[in-house]
Image (cartoon, rainbow, N blue to C red):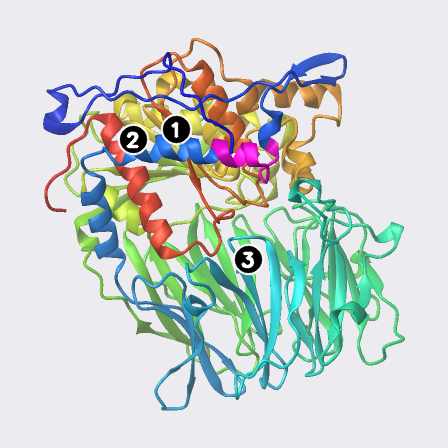
Amino acid sequence: MKKIIFPAMMVLTILSCTEQVKKEEKVAIVYPETKKDTVVDIYFGQQVADPYRWLEDDRSTETEAWVKAQNVVTFGYLNKIPQREQLKERISALWNYEKVSTPFFEDGVKYFYKNDGLQNQYVLYSQKGDEAPTVFLDPNVFSKDGTTSLGEITFSKNGKLAAYSISEGGSDWRKVIVMSAETKTILEDTLIDVKFSGLSWKGNEGFYYSSYDKPKGSELSAKTDQHKLFYHKLGTAQKTDQLIFGGKASEKRRYVGGSVTEDDKYLVISAAESTSGNELYIKDLSNDKNPIVKMVEGFETDNNVMENDGTKLFIATNFNAPNQRVITVDAKNPKQENWIDFIPETENVLTPSTAAGYFFAHYMKDAVSQVKQYDYDGKFIREIELPGLGTASGFGGKKEDTTVYFSFTNYNTPQSNYAVQPKNGETSLYWSPKIDFNANDFESKQVFYTSKDGTKVPMIITYKKGLKLDGKNPTMLYGYGGFNISITPSFSVANAVWMENGGVYAVANMRGGGEYGRKWHDAGTQLLKQNVFDDFIAAAEFLIKENYTSSDYLAISGRSNGGLLVGACMTQRPELFKVAFPGVGVLDMLRYHTFTSGAGWAYDYGTSDQSEEMFNYLKNYSPVHNVKKGTKYPATLVTTGDHDDRVVPAHSFKYAAELQDKNDGTNPTLIRIETNAGHGAGTPVSKLIDLNADILSFAFYNMGVELSKKP
C-alpha cells in the first residue's frame, strides 16, 4: 500500500454554523497529496497537460490508496458537521413510509413492486385474485450489503416463465436469470456479461437480449462500437445463442435493441450510433428465413414501433415532427414515404403509450403532464383528468387489460397511483402513501426567466408557504440540460427535508433537455452547449434578483450530464455560488469519449478529435481543464462511485485533484467516493440516506444556516 503524505500547506478555515456563525470554529483540512505526472497530449498542434492521467486506472493499488485517503479526509470533515445526524435522522424517518408501484398483469396474476420503507431494494410481489400478495422476488436477499439490484423482468407470452436481470455493485454489466413464474425454480444457467439490454420473449421458447464483447482487464478499455442482438433459446448454453444483428462490419452500432410485438408477429430492431437518432428494422417472425427489412435509413430521427394491428404498424417518431407524432404504415411496405399521420404533431412534446385497446398521448406542456386518449382509428376520446399539476407516468399495458393505471407526483406530493376505466374515463385513487409530510404546507411556482441570448426558460420553484423574499433563503438549484431528457416534477424525501428547514428547491428546464422537443434539445448540443450553462447561470441570477436567495445562500446540484453542468458553471462563475455538488459528472471533455460508453454521447457533446473547432470549444468549458490557480471556488463536494462503469470515476478524481491543487479560497473542495457503487441505479436506500444527509448538511453548514430543532 502506498504511503499517503499530507502536505501541511493545504489548510483551510471553515466557519461553524452554530449560533448563526456568531462564533468561529476553525477546522483544518489537510488534503492527500496527489501525484502529478508529465503526460501531455497533442490536439491539432496544441499541447494539453494531463497530470492526473494515472487516476484513470481505477483498479490500480495507487488509485485505491488515493481513494481511501480522500474518503478519510472527506468523512473526517462531514463527521464534524453538527447538523448531520439531525438531518440523517429526519431523512430516515421521512423515508420510512410504504411505497407501491402501479400494477401489471401476466397470465391473470397481478404483479407490483413495494418497499416497506427503509428496505434497500424494492420487492416484487405477486397476487392471484383475492389472495394475499406474496413475495415473488426480493433483491434484498441477493447480497449481504444490498448492492445487488433487480433490473428488468419480462414474462413469456403465456406468463409462465420470467427472465430477469440483476446488477452487482451498481455495474451496467448484468446477469440474466430464467425462472418458472409458478414454482420460482431457476430453470437454467445464468447468462452473463449482458449490457444496455432489454429482454423480449419470442413466444415461450426464448428471448432476445443485447450486449458487447466484455473487455479483459480495465473496463476503461471497452470498445462500444459493436453492440450485438442475440436470441437465447431456453435450455441451451449462452455460447450457442444465435447472433441476430451486429456481427457484420456493416452492422457496427453502439446501441442495438430488439423487441417482439405483443402478438408475436414481428421482431423490431433499433440500431443507433449515439443517444439520439436510430435506424429501424423489422422481421416477420412467421418464418425464420424471412429477412430483416430496414424501415428507417440513417440516424437523423428517433423512431419506435410501439404497436401493431395485424400488418398495420404504429410508430412514434420525430421524423418531420420535432415534437413527436404517431404514424401508421403497412409492414409489407414500411418505407418512410408511405407513413401516414395517426396522432399528428402539436406544439407540445408527445410520448405515446398503449393499453386496454387504446392509445394514450402523454403531452408535456411546460414540463407538466397532460394526457389524451385515442382509439385505434385515431379518434380522440377524451382528456384524462389528472389530480393536479405535476408528472403522470404509466398508461401502459396489454390489449386485453380492462383497467389502465398511472402514477402522479410533483415536487411537494409523494407518488400516488390511480386507476382509469378506459370505456368511460372514470378515474379513481388506487393507492396513496401515508407519510409524515404535509404537502399543503408547501407550494410550487413556475416562472419563465430570460437567458443570456433572450431565450425564455421555465423553472419551477418550491418552498414552504409564507417564504420571505429577503435574499437569505438557502436555495438548491438543480439542473440537467442534455440528451433530450426532460426534468419533470417529482417528490424527493431529501428535497422535502431541505424545504422543511426553510430551503428553496428550484429546477430549471434548460436547453439540451427534451421539454420542448428536438429543437430544444439540439439548441444545447455540441457547438451550442454553452447555451445550457448560460441558461443555468441565468436561473441563478433570476433567483438572486427576485430575492429568493443570494450568492451566500445558493447551492447548485446535478448528476451525470448535470454534474458537467455544475462543474462548468462553477468554473465559469465561481463567485455566483456558495456551494456546488457535481455528482458522477462528465468532467474531462477532451477524453470522455475514450472511456466505456462515452463515445455514444458524441451527438450531445462532439469529440476533441472531431475538428479543431470542436476541440477548442470543448477545451474552453471542460471543467477539468478550466480550474484556475488562485481562484476562490464554492464549497464543493464532488460525489462518485468507485466502480462507475458509465461515467467513470476518473472524471471526478481528476476534477477534485485540480480543485484541491488550485483553489485559493477558504471553502473546502472535497470528494465523496462511494465504494462498491456505480452510476446510481439500484443504489441501496441506506447509502442514499447517508449521501443525502451528507449533501444537505454540507450545504447548510457552508451557508452558515442553523437548523430548527423540529421540521
Hey, which quadrant is residue 217 in on the image? top right
Q: Badge 3 local density, few (<14 within 10 Å), some, or many (20+)?
A: some
Q: Amino acid at mark 2?
A: Tyr
Is 449 above or below relative to 441?
above
**Mark number for residue 670?**
1
Please state if 19 lies on the left or on the right of 58 as rendered.
left
What is the secondary structure assignment of the residue under circle 2? Answer: helix
* Image coordinates for residue 353, horizontal then vertical, percent: 55, 66
Q: Earlier in the sequence, mark 3 or mark 1?
A: 3
Q: Residue at x 39, y 22 (%)?
A: 31
What is the secondary structure assignment of the residue under circle 3? Answer: strand
**Mark number for residue 351?**
3
What is the secondary structure assignment of the residue under circle 1? Answer: strand
In three-dimensional space, the C-alpha distance between marks 3 and 1, rounded to whole angstroms, equals 40 Å
The residue pinned by badge 2 equals 77
Is residue 258 visible in this depiction of the protein?
no
Please state if 259 lies on the left or on the right of 441 as rendered.
right
Q: Amino acid at mark 3?
A: Thr
Query: Which range of residues does the magenta coloring cover?
Result: 56-66
Q: Residue at x 55, y 25 (%)?
A: 530
